[in-house]
Image (spheres, grey):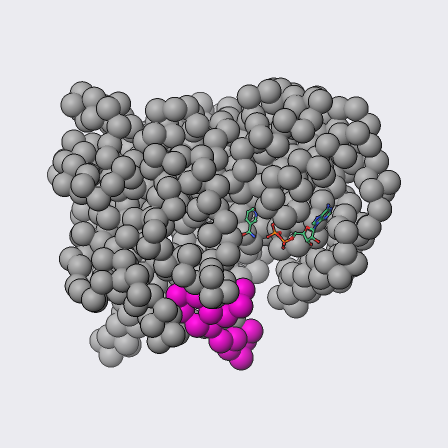
Amino acid sequence: MLYKSDSFEVSFIKENIAEFKFCATASVNTLSQQTLSDCATALKQLAANTDIKGMIFTSDKEHFIIGADVFEFLPIFTRSEAELVTWIKEATDVFDAIEDLPFPTLSAVNGLALGGGCEWVLATDYRVASETAQMGLPEVTLGIMPGFGGTVRLPRIIGADNAMMWITSGSTNRAADALKVGAFDAVVSADKLIESSVSTLELAIAGKLDWQAKRNVKLQPLKLNRVEQGMSFAMAEGMVMAKTKGHYPAPVMAVKTIKAAANCTRDEAMAIENANFAKLAGTPEVAAQIGIFLADQYIKGKSRKLAKQSDVEIKQAAVLGAGIMGGGIAYQSAYKGTPIIMKDIQQDALDLGMGEASKLLGQKVKRGHMSMEKMLGTLSKIKPTLNDSDLQSADIIVEAVVENPKVKQAVLAELEKTMPEGTVLTSNTSTICIDLLAEALDKPENFCGMHFFNPVPKMPLVEIIRGAKTSDKTINAVVDYALKLGKSPIVVNDCPGFFVNRVLFPYFAGFSKLVVEGANFAKVDKVMENVFGWPMGPAYLLDVVGIDTAFHCTGVMADGFPERMARADKDPVTIFANEKRFGQKNKAGFYKYETDRRGRLKKSHDETAIELLKPITEAEKAFDKQEIIDRCMIPMLNEVLLCLQEGIVASPQEADMALVYGVGFPPFRGGAFRYLDQTGLANFVATADKYAHLGAIYQVSEQTRQWAEEGRVFYK
Ligand code: NAD
């Protein structure tokens, strides 16, 4: 044994060739602070060992190294910029030490090499990968940029254009694609990985491969002349700005760093990366995006624990209703491997549901992501039927019929009567109280809400609603099924609208009031999209949700919370609903829609919508951007706070992830509670007080006021 630490060991694999094997005690290899510090000590010793003529880096895990230890980031990132530069330089010195070893080095990449793991393999002279290996620099998804030499080495290895594409998108690249651009030197079958790697290294040691020349490319400036550089960086900057709309500093900083270091040697370039990494690390966007990563880990851990406790084996599912939602649920279940019976009362609906599933699977086949055989296998897992008797084998049933409490109660009561005892029953209602639906059941303990979001295949969130009488057994089984569907389940307590719709409708109410007072809704959309960062503004979102659906939900919310959410006398949604302008579904709402050549709906200005609103709106006037944001967001944030105070949602992490995954709350803001922390709760209360005269949705609760006085923060 040449060296041993908690996370790696080094020994001779062959005479003169050392194997540096990552073998953490955890299930994956990560580059924690401790590991990096151990590596620094080990590399010093190994460099001085004249018996070593070459070194191969391997992993004993399914993956190579999945990155730095993200759990360590946030406390480190609170340090001063100067301290951060010192810290990150120490880390990059380790990677430089790999690159400067006095013998040829090679990474044998057997699985994922991501982030710091990718930067590790870039520091070695050769990279041989197995066919299933993947590499990438996903740092921008955490709001940061590669900081262990990735912005320096990758452009020198695969060219600036490719490198900027990888780094700014945060993509994970398959072995074959990485080979094409030269990130991997060879791709071999998994069983040949070590053998091929050792023989490559032997060729280098024997001088038959010029490893020094290969290394030298990484130590020198980029091989691009000034004109090429000008074009390359201008294009990358333009693309990044268009994509991030200025909300995500990380990809912008990454391009800036590569550009600034283009004509530098490695050491000069590394100093630029160190400095820019430190600048970025202290930004609120980094805290928000890393916060999302940590909150995601938190909700995953919580749901896995519940699923593990489930004693219901879900071999067969069923969905009632083959509409937009039922069809989507059937597709997702079959695609993820749980067979599903899809029942409707109309053959047309079943045909439409099956047609939609075939279309979605067909697209996967067309893009080369699925074989024809797998497509047919998946389709055969959906069993369409008009007969109740076909449901008998289902272990869980998702009711997704029309949003009408009487119809839902009748359907659920019938199911309880006819299905074997103990079958788990759920409803995909978007607003109706679970306890109200449960009144129709003899055994409400077997029932809960399972609220999917539209479109089901795309939206990660499933809200699981615990009724007053729902048993833990039911919740555990439904969480288990949601995880099997590849979704992120979040368990909430029951109330009208549950969590997501309960907080969304006050936001719509705030927006409607602005429009009634003369705000131009298209301008409000622009501010909420371009300045606040929502994927779509409130008017556009209402068109997507469906004006009829929104009108209906507003009624349910008004009944549930009459003191705050009573239907307004002057309400754009009511006007459009009465005119049967249902939004995207019939191509007219706030906007009008046309299908483009690629089959996508394109929105445009519609004078008719403006005319229809005239009787209830004041003359158009301009509103300040911040006022628009405050007047839309305060009602939502107030309701989010109430949901935590009433125990509808259990933690800030779950609330924030539900908003990010369910309605696309801007990730760079990290969710509602992160936003409140960054705004300061006292500042939020002061702003809300300014608008308190506008109505109850702007008035903060006593608890919120008290929290503000105590200086409460939601993320420590
Ligand atoms: P939809 O109108 O597209 O589909 C409803 C389907 O249920 C129709 O095919 C209808 O034939 C069928 N149906 C009616 N009575 C039935 C019965 N007794 N047995 C079997 N099938 C029956 O509606 P949707 O948009 O899919 O919504 C379904 C449910 O999902 C509603 O509760 C809705 O609130 C909820 N939801 C909808 C969305 C959305 O964006 N559309 C999002 C989340 C939740």
- Out of 407 and 278, give the one closest to the viewer: 407
Judge from the rendering whether residue 416 lies leftward or rightward of residue 2; answer left or right. right
Q: Is residue 79 above or below residue 615?
A: above
Residue under the point 50% across and 33% down = 490
Q: Which part of the image, by quadrant, shows the C terminus?
A: top left
> What is the residue that sits farthest to the right in this orientation?
389
Q: Residue at x 77, y 51 (%)?
A: 345
Observer-nearest residue: 684 or 714?
A: 684
Residue 327 sits above or below residue 84 on the image: below
698 vs 306, nearest the viewer: 698
Q: Is residue 501 visible?
A: yes
Q: Give x and y (percent) for residue 49.
A: 38, 34
Q: Does residue 493 show up magenta in the picture?
A: no
Residue 393: image x %, image y %? 83, 36
**Image height check: is 486 above or below 304?**
below
Q: Residue at the spot x=64%, y=39% of the render? A: 406
Q: In the rendered structure, which segment of residues is drawn in magenta? A: 584-599
Q: Could you tell whether 694 is left or right of 482 in the image?
A: left
Residue positioned 82% across, 32% down in the render: 418
